[in-house]
């Protein structure tokens, strides 16, 4: 199995993110044509993975892409529902917002005790 770039001979690295394919940290794939490339970290050229090594990885990447697309759709639905929702950046900002909005009860304006 190859582990080096075909252009600059740099090591492509090892990834534990995808069980079906552990070479390289950056991958590119074309599910329609069944192609998979490992992007070289040094020269950024794409190295085509041999056909006998790519099918399981392409299937795993397709599954991951479907999972991410579903999560994105869910996030879009939540964003559409919560147009008027205010999410302050930190607890102090939330506390200031709650006090400005008229929250006087300690359980609404102060963080819970650890």
Image (tube, grey):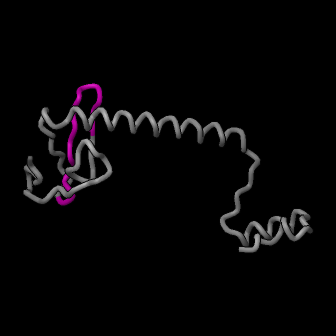
* Residue at image location 56% in from the left, 35% down from the top: 73
At 29% from the left and 53% from the top, the residue drawn is 16
Q: Nearer the viewer, residue 4 or 42?
A: 4
Position of residue 105 measured from the top left corner of the image (x, y, whole percent) = 91, 67
Picture coordinates of residue 72 (x, y %)?
53, 40
**Furthest-front residue in view?**
114
Left or right of 92 on screen, residue 37: left
Q: Quadrant of residue 29?
A: top left
Residue 106 against residue 76 in the figure, above or below: below
Give the magenta-colored segment's residue range: 29-42
Q: Is residue 39 visible?
A: no
Vertical side of 87 occupied by 65: above or below: above
What residue appears at the point 40 percent right and 37 percent down from the top-left corner?
65
Taking depth in this image into account, of 17 and 48 the one nearest to the observer is: 17
Q: Is residue 89 magenta?
A: no
Q: Quadrant of the C terminus?
A: bottom right
Q: Residue at x 13, y 32 (%)?
A: 51
The x, y position of residue 4, in whole percent, is 10, 54
Please tell me how many numbered marks the rendered image carries.
0
Q: Nearer the viewer, residue 69 or 42?
A: 69
Q: Is residue 7 above or below residue 94?
A: above
User: Residue 18 in the image: x percent, y percent?
Assistant: 30, 46
Quick check: can you spot residue 111? yes
Question: Toward the viewer: 110 or 73?
Answer: 110
**Left or right of residue 8: residue 22:** right
Q: Quadrant of residue 21?
A: top left
Q: Is residue 32 magenta?
A: yes
The image quadrant that residue 37 belongs to is top left
Compared with residue 21, is residue 5 higher up or lower down, i.e. above or below? Answer: below
């Amino acid at each position: 199995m190859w582990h080096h770039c075909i252009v600059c001979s740099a090591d492509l690295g090892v990834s534990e993110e995808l069980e079906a394919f552990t070479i390289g940290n950056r991958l590119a794939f074309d599910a329609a044509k069944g192609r998979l490339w490992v992007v070289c970290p040094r020269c950024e050229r794409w190295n085509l993975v041999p056909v006998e090594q790519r099918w399981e990885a392409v299937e795993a990447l397709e599954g991951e892409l479907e999972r991410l697309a579903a999560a994105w759709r869910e996030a879009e639905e939540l964003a559409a529902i919560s147009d008027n929702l205010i999410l302050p950046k930190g607890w102090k900002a939330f506390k200031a917002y709650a006090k400005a909005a008229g929250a006087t009860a300690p359980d609404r304006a102060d963080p819970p005790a650890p």
